[in-house]
Image (spheres, rainbow, N blue to C red):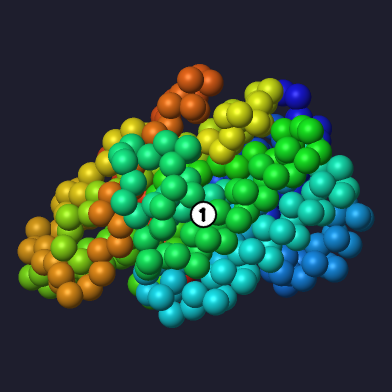
């Protein structure tokens, strides 16, 4: 492996994607790894970010840190979502360029695509329409980060900045707090709690009709480490990370209930927002390079639920 001895900084190493990337790096024999907690390094503070990069000079950066959350968090804190994610992206991209990082991975989001977008969504569809209103601030900040990566590559004549766009990530160490979690983690917790309390039914947000694609977090990490070892060209950036299949929220809820062992009724509250009607990524760019996912949704749900029962439940808000 070309970068086995390189100094690698994983920003957001305690989060869902960051913790998976860190774990996968360790399992593959990477040892020169750098992590910083938010207390140790505030990525919204440009002076602190520059000082860290000047002193530590990471050669590879995985920018997994960010302000994230579900529909409620996006609705209630749009200014913070935009300001914090913009600041973190700019500060780390600028410092990576200035202090000579060889590779910088930026994580976009499928919510960057237009709300009404042909499916599956190809990378060329970015900026052809307005994103879903319930996540607009986050989407705009992520679009800016992706665009910044491409602009730096263009101006400096290389391919150091690699924006990837994973679809809905899930897995161990997800956020299961019902006020800020994404849909799959929220379903796992709600249905698990309904089973524990022997509730005859569980009420979920929306109509259950929107369709979503879910990518197990270790597959996202695997795709990024695959790309790390490839010689990429700017004309294939950004790169979607997806599995090529989606399902409705109602179908997902039924799968979660089956995995949890809950036999009660699942009811949907259509007065609550649905979000975008469908978000399925076209990952043919990545697949043409030779990468394929390894973990099925059924396998991933079992791993996720087992982790939640054994570890996550005690940490949930």
183 vs 162, nearest the viewer = 162
Q: Is residue 216 above or below residue 315?
A: above
Q: Which residue is mark 1?
A: 16
| Direction front: furthest residue | 128
The percent position of residue 311, horizontal first and vertical second, equals 44, 60
Q: Residue at x 60, y 56 (%)?
A: 144
Q: Residue at x 44, y 48 (%)?
A: 128
Which quarter of the image is occupied by the N terminus?
top right
123 vs 226, nearest the viewer = 123
The percent position of residue 193, horizontal first and vertical second, equals 25, 69
Q: Is residue 32 visible?
A: no
- Direction from residue 176 to residue 259 in the image, left or right: left
Q: Is residue 233 above or below residue 56?
A: above
The percent position of residue 58, horizontal first and vertical second, equals 82, 46
The percent position of residue 240, horizontal first and vertical second, equals 48, 38
What is the secondary structure assignment of the residue under circle 1? Answer: helix
Count of numbered circles in the view: 1
Which quarter of the image is occupied by the C terminus?
bottom left
- Direction from residue 268 to residue 309 in the image, left or right: right
307 vs 62, nearest the viewer = 62
Mark 1 Cα-neighbour bin, 10 Å: few <14, some 14–19, many ≥20: many
68 vs 301, nearest the viewer = 68
């Amino acid at each position: 492996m070309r970068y086995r001895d390189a100094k690698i900084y994983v920003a957001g190493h305690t989060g869902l994607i960051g913790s998976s990337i860190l774990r996968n790096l360790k399992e593959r024999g990477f040892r020169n790894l750098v992590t910083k907690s938010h207390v140790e390094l505030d990525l919204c503070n440009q002076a602190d970010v520059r000082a860290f990069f000047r002193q530590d000079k990471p050669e590879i950066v995985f920018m997994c840190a960010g302000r994230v959350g579900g529909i409620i968090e996006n609705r209630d804190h749009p200014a913070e979502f935009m300001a914090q994610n913009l600041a973190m992206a700019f500060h780390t991209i600028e410092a990576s360029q200035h202090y000579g990082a060889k590779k910088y991975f930026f994580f976009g989001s499928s919510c960057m695509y237009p709300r009404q977008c042909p499916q599956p969504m190809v990378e060329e569809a970015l900026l052809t329409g307005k994103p879903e209103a319930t996540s607009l601030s986050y989407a705009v900040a992520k679009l800016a980060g992706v665009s910044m990566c491409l602009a730096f590559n263009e101006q400096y004549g290389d391919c150091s900045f690699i924006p990837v766009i994973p679809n809905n990530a899930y897995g161990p160490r997800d956020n299961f707090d019902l006020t800020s979690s994404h849909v799959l983690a929220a379903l796992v917790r709600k249905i698990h709690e309904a089973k524990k309390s022997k509730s005859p039914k569980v009420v979920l947000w929306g109509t259950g009709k929107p369709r979503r694609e879910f990518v197990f977090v270790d597959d996202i990490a695997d795709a990024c480490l695959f790309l790390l070892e490839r010689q990429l060209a700017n004309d294939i950036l950004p790169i979607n990370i997806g599995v090529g299949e989606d399902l409705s929220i109602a179908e997902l809820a039924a799968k979660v209930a089956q995995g949890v062992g809950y036999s009660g009724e699942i009811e949907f509250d259509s007065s609550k927002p649905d979000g975008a009607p469908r978000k399925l990524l076209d990952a043919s760019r990545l697949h043409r390079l030779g990468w394929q996912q390894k973990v099925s949704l059924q396998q991933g749900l079992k791993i996720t639920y087992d982790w939640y029962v054994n570890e996550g439940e005690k940490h949930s808000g």
